[in-house]
Amino acid sequence: MTDAPLRFGLIGTGRIGQVHAANIATSPDTVLSWVADPMVDGAHAVAERFGGRVTDAADELFAAGDVDAVLIASPTPTHVDLIAQAVDRGIPVLCEKPIDLDIARVEALRPKVAASGVPVALGFNRRFDPAFAEVQARVAAGEIGALEQLTIISRDPAAPPAAYIGVSGGIFRDMTIHDFDMARFFLPDIVEVTAVGTTTFDDGAREHGDFDTAVVTLRAASGAVVTVINSRHSAVGYDQRLEAFGARGSLQVANRSTSLVSLSTAERVDARAPFEDFFLQRYADAYAAELDAFVALVRGGASTSPTFEDGRAALVLADAAQRSATEHVSVAVHTD
Amino acid sequence: MTDAPLRFGLIGTGRIGQVHAANIATSPDTVLSWVADPMVDGAHAVAERFGGRVTDAADELFAAGDVDAVLIASPTPTHVDLIAQAVDRGIPVLCEKPIDLDIARVEALRPKVAASGVPVALGFNRRFDPAFAEVQARVAAGEIGALEQLTIISRDPAAPPAAYIGVSGGIFRDMTIHDFDMARFFLPDIVEVTAVGTTTFDDGAREHGDFDTAVVTLRAASGAVVTVINSRHSAVGYDQRLEAFGARGSLQVANRSTSLVSLSTAERVDARAPFEDFFLQRYADAYAAELDAFVALVRGGASTSPTFEDGRAALVLADAAQRSATEHVSVAVHTD
Amino acid sequence: MTDAPLRFGLIGTGRIGQVHAANIATSPDTVLSWVADPMVDGAHAVAERFGGRVTDAADELFAAGDVDAVLIASPTPTHVDLIAQAVDRGIPVLCEKPIDLDIARVEALRPKVAASGVPVALGFNRRFDPAFAEVQARVAAGEIGALEQLTIISRDPAAPPAAYIGVSGGIFRDMTIHDFDMARFFLPDIVEVTAVGTTTFDDGAREHGDFDTAVVTLRAASGAVVTVINSRHSAVGYDQRLEAFGARGSLQVANRSTSLVSLSTAERVDARAPFEDFFLQRYADAYAAELDAFVALVRGGASTSPTFEDGRAALVLADAAQRSATEHVSVAVHTD
Amino acid sequence: MTDAPLRFGLIGTGRIGQVHAANIATSPDTVLSWVADPMVDGAHAVAERFGGRVTDAADELFAAGDVDAVLIASPTPTHVDLIAQAVDRGIPVLCEKPIDLDIARVEALRPKVAASGVPVALGFNRRFDPAFAEVQARVAAGEIGALEQLTIISRDPAAPPAAYIGVSGGIFRDMTIHDFDMARFFLPDIVEVTAVGTTTFDDGAREHGDFDTAVVTLRAASGAVVTVINSRHSAVGYDQRLEAFGARGSLQVANRSTSLVSLSTAERVDARAPFEDFFLQRYADAYAAELDAFVALVRGGASTSPTFEDGRAALVLADAAQRSATEHVSVAVHTD
């Protein structure tokens, strides 16, 4: 592998595909070589702004011969087949989460990925957020002593449409899966999952038997306990906080305020527009850093990219949470 | 009942008994009439500073005829008998938490208390903290819409001695019981308890089969979910935070900093000595307000004093948490 | 001088006299021996709560023979004569600020005080505020390197009545005088005063030719610059902040919030009731510490009590500020 | 004027010229047409990244005929002549501050600019910072009542080289000039300037008779008072704060922290890396918004661009401050 920019094939040009396209075009280490989407107008729009040849068929992209890596940002049900194709051709993959909603399909793919040696990275972008990454590194460096409790508050601004809920796989596989990976970023060896879910405000969740509110407690092999607090809505905006509590102190990640202005009056002190809207704004830096880490992975350097195994482990935890919340029992798990 | 100051008999002159004695002596509505403690030196020391006659036998206090109310701050195993005596004599009671560690003894006492009509209040002081009380009132007034999630972080500065752990009834009955009552302050009707406990740092807890770290999830009849996060130690000091999350916003209680000073340098911005040491400092105001509410209760006015029933309900939740954490199942409960 | 509690004669029983009376009664090192006020009802009310004999004539108090120290909290025009009497009798004095509004009277008294060797302390209470005292000590210890700028924001909650303004000596002698002393707490050797005053909202100030808004810049011999920003009103409450800016960093004192509660909604994050009402609340700790320091001074120990000389120096700066603001020139000063 | 992108000629390709080039290239409303710099290598580097033809002579750029607007980012002494050339050709100008260090040259150019009707905007970028702009708008909307005090703290991270100080025109014309414009953004009609300057840490300032520390007090016609607190260095990073204090409350702009992470330990609560490094980071958004406002000005729409007159007024205030600090008197000014 030379130092020439990595030629990317991008599959999928929806909201998140466009973010990746912009980052690929902006980074000096990468270039957009192909853009594939069955809805070819979207592919053309992306290629016009960020370069690359266009196709409505991922097969053409794989066959072209000038693709050094693929970025899979297409709908979840297509991920397994696309990863398999890439691995067969020896092309490294950065795939949006989740691998699939069905653990059986993930398990079926697992040996091929493992045997191939082809780098397959999962798009758990939050690991690359500067704040979360800083806290993880400082915990790992022992700054707060042994990690005893990790508390993750993760609330989306608004519930998705009912139709989306119906195909989402449920809150644990769709939304909490990011938090499962964040938990494993700090504590890879989770041994028990206990989940409580309720539905109090979202008709879409109620219609599809899903939860709109959830609390998940994870026990790590070390005895440390992770608490994940989720809601499908948040009046105050995208709510993404974390506290790592250790024997010698705590490290905390606050929400990012959108304004430096505060008002003081006889009644109160306030600040407007408290939080970033949603993940595209909040994690803009993270998506760029995620791409850099993937390039390092492909080039054989040290990399913090979450892998196919991490993607599988998060799904194992999501499945366990689903069972725990439904059957009202704690569920023992093994993620390796 | 005239407007003359309420004459209190104080039973127990340990750390918390002394706090109550000072508040009784300071309030214009109350006066310290008797001080009882088998360790009579302690009783004498309290009476010298705050007034009252001294005895080493609570019986003498009950028989004296000049006691309008008793404040029970003696060891937990004495509470049930002392409450029974007071109720038999028609003397209102303010009893430190918990009523007892054994729910069977509480159930046995329950009909007598209910039949008597004598006011029996439980010393869940945190309900009277200005910050928690304000949040509860604003939630009740609908300021954040329907309450969906309540998150309580409650960590003591340091684990108690191993000997204390051995007679404490375990973390849920000894420490979390305050948080169970706080949960019921917002959401009285809890229907399910799910608890996870681990032991990672405290040899005393390990020795006695107790937990030093716990996360409890409570489901309310409304579908709201409460999360309690406990630790027996906290390097940063007494950690007492709460977030009420509703459909239209959140109300939060922060820790109280002990300094107004901050330092800004090239490396960081910091503030020294972040939190109050422990409950006597943090809840000093609350103990005084608790006494005021009890006086109002005795005088037949509107009162927010938690009752014997609240004390029993908290113990029901603690027992359920103990079972949940041990058997790894969620436990359905009825607190009425 | 034995270790027996210091017997205080209190002269003046207005708002601030009552604060001192309570502190004298509460401290184990002091006792209230006499209370003098021409409005003798006030003196009786204080003595009933805090002890001491009562008189309407300060002369009787001085003559009684059982007064170890006097605390002068009577109207400003009486201070000079009362200090003189105390010094003549060899009785140490803690006198409320200012010594007098007329520097000529202060200069006339100065030699007597200096020659007597009797401790005369001035009631610049803010030096004893834990936050300001901490910052001063940390600056003195070199924590932020050489002190280059000191910024003091000091705003009262509401303008005093017009009648008070008329006898106040003007904003610089009445209000800024506290800030002049605070400036000298950090930088005793001030060499130049530059002041700007305007009147924009207070009719009382306008009527009496006074300012309701002022900015004073002080140059210290070291080259450090102090900025004092004053207003006679503040919608948000008593506004008392300070920033010490040095070569290696800054130390800041924030206002003290009266609530730990904050609200987050879609529009804003806010906290109610931001600041303490006024000086009796904000500086309650400081008044007690001021008394302790005075006791130490009287007993010959190390003491941080501001002295008669400090009281004179603050008035010199106030006079210079008045001239600067009126004549639109900077004024050179010598405060020793 | 059609809706075609505005074709810019950029003169000067130093640090700030490169920022403007990037913004011109990124905005859909603008395009980089010409890049001029006598150091032509810099011009070539800019053109390679952002487009445009290159010249070492501004004359060529003016003569080319395909320039709709010029952005002057060349050294200060060239500004007057370049503005004059642009105005003669009827080409709108966005010129970096200051117009010139010599008010006589500015006054000489003033009638030509006024008579021409050609838009000439000054690059006071801070007006376009979202936080400062929000506060100015909310004050103008009456949210805090009448504006009584404006406090601007403005400190650079580190003093410039001594050689730069020598040609800078002094701290008031070089650094405070931004704060003078900010003052006029809120209170255009300043009538008196009082300045105090000292030199305590910077040998370059000492060598050239300049100040490294300054406090300037401005009196507005309304009676409102502005305080500007400057330092040529700041250990904690670029320090840019503002408080607008009005009859009904205050609006404050805080520094922007570079991290969402905080650490809590037994000793302190801290946050790393408190502030943005310097103006290119802190005001990145402002430079883009400044360009947008200028495009609106050129197209005849409503615009908040500061004008040639604003540039002149800031210099008048700087000259008055220089005189005030040197002669130790307040200086009456007229800025219109």
Image: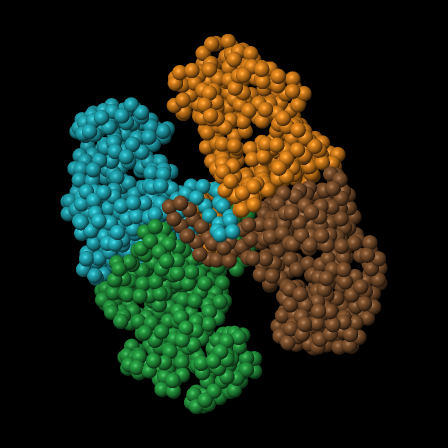
Chain colours: A brown, B orange, C cyan, D green
Q: Nearer the viewer, residue C93 or D23?
A: D23
In the picture, residue D333 is in which quadrant? bottom left
**Residue depicted at x 49% and y 55%:** A273
Question: Is C244 left or right of C219, judged from the image as shown?
Answer: right
Residue A313 vs C12, above or below: the answer is: below
The percent position of residue C329, horizontal first and vertical second, equals 21, 62
The percent position of residue B195, horizontal first and vertical second, equals 68, 37
Question: Is D312 left or right of B88, judged from the image as shown?
Answer: left
The percent position of residue C55, horizontal first and vertical second, equals 20, 25
Residue C188 in view (yes/no): no
Q: Nearer the viewer, residue B254 or D32?
A: D32
Q: Nearer the viewer, residue A306 or D95?
A: D95
In the picture, residue B169 is in which quadrant? top right
Residue D2 in view (yes/no): yes
The percent position of residue A166, horizontal first and vertical second, equals 71, 52
Residue B293 vs A241, above or below: the answer is: above
Residue D111 vs B102, above or below: the answer is: below
**Residue depicted at x 63% and y 39%:** B223
Quarter holding the N terminus of chain D is bottom left
Question: Is B285 left or right of D101, judged from the image as shown?
Answer: right
**Residue depicted at x 25% and y 31%:** C13
**Residue depicted at x 20% and y 51%:** C206
Q: Nearer the viewer, residue A192 or B113?
A: B113
Quarter holding the C terminus of chain D is bottom left
Residue B230 vs B22, above or below: the answer is: below
Task: Give the number of marks.
Answer: 0
